[in-house]
Image: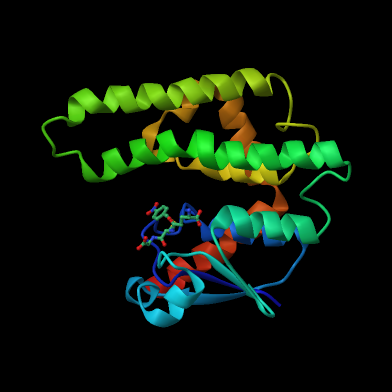
Amino acid sequence: MPTITAFASSPDRGRGQARDMRVRWALEEVGQPYDVRLVSFEDLKQPPHRALHPFGQIPTYEDGDLALFESGAIVLHIAERHAGLLPLDANGRSRAIAWMFAALNTVEPPIIELGMAMLLERDRSWYAERLPMLQDRVRVRLGELSRHLGNAEWLDGAFSAGDLMMVTMLRRLNPSGLLEEYPDLAAYVARGEARPAFQQAFAAQLAVFNAARS
Ligand code: GTB
């Protein structure tokens, strides 16, 4: 049974925004049970955890003699070894993987930059001027994504690891209100969140947060 790491006390307060959520979701989608080792912020920077993750972060993934870090690499590993998250035909698989990379490399960066500014820069003199610029950079990607999605249910045929990654990225926009400007993308995220595997993963990470509070 694989073991992943997650925050013992997540700063997202159980909202499923930390990156263990996408790994949990992938494991639930393919029906693979897993263990979770909870780590504190202090643990992350200690040698035992750094041996698993050079950057001292969550999530990690251990299975037998394999140890992995980076949520994208972990989700791809799960998707490649189990049925259900990648199409069977080679071209479809490559396109689904391209969507994983697009989520990580093209869509996530402006979303993270906006989120970090909203979290850490509110009291800075430049915040009011910088915020609309960051919001517009996110809107560019949302507009492009919305045009691609059109009336489709998922990004490229059946639900895939590409959708799983994209939905988790778009969920990071929840506090910004930007997703509501794109009702088709909001509905796309809602479709992802309605999947039983998402619900199970969400409940599992929320249970950790609730246990830490009590
Ligand atoms: N590229 C890596 C991956 O995809 O796996 C990034 C991993 C990463 O950023 N991990 C974060 C971490 O361990 C947790 S998820 N941070 C501790 C550190 O760097 O010392 C990022 C995150 C944190 C908090 C919220 N939140 O509060 O809403 C959301 C997401």
Image quarter for ligand 1: bottom left
Q: Give the x, y percent position of residue 74.
A: 62, 60
Q: Which residue is situated farthest in the right direction here?
A: 89
Position of residue 156 in the picture relative to residue 135 (left or right):
right
Measured along the vertical axis of the image, is residue 25 above or below residue 194? Answer: below
User: Going 54% across and 68% down the picture, which residue do you hit?
Assistant: 60
User: Going 66% across and 21% down the picture, which residue do you hit?
Assistant: 148
Please tell me how many numbered marks the rendered image carries: 0
Measured along the vertical axis of the image, is residue 37 above or below residue 157? Answer: below
Which quadrant is the N terminus positioned in? bottom right
Task: Give residue 214's quadrant in the image.
Answer: bottom left
User: Going 52% across and 71% down the picture, which residue do you hit?
Assistant: 5
Residue placed most toward the observer, 18 or 59: 59
Q: Give the x, y percent position of residue 27.
A: 69, 62
Position of residue 127 in the picture relative to residue 20 (left or right):
left
Task: Give residue 8's quadrant in the image.
Answer: bottom left
Residue placed most toward the observer, 145 or 177: 145
User: Going 39% across and 72% down the picture, which residue do you hit?
Assistant: 44
Measured along the vertical axis of the image, is residue 171 above or below residue 180? Answer: below
Position of residue 1 in the picture relative to residue 123 (left or right):
right
Q: Give the x, y percent position of residue 23.
A: 61, 59
Q: Give the x, y percent position of residue 24.
A: 62, 61
Residue 29 shows in the view: no
Residue 23 shows in the view: yes
**Figure colour scheme:** rainbow
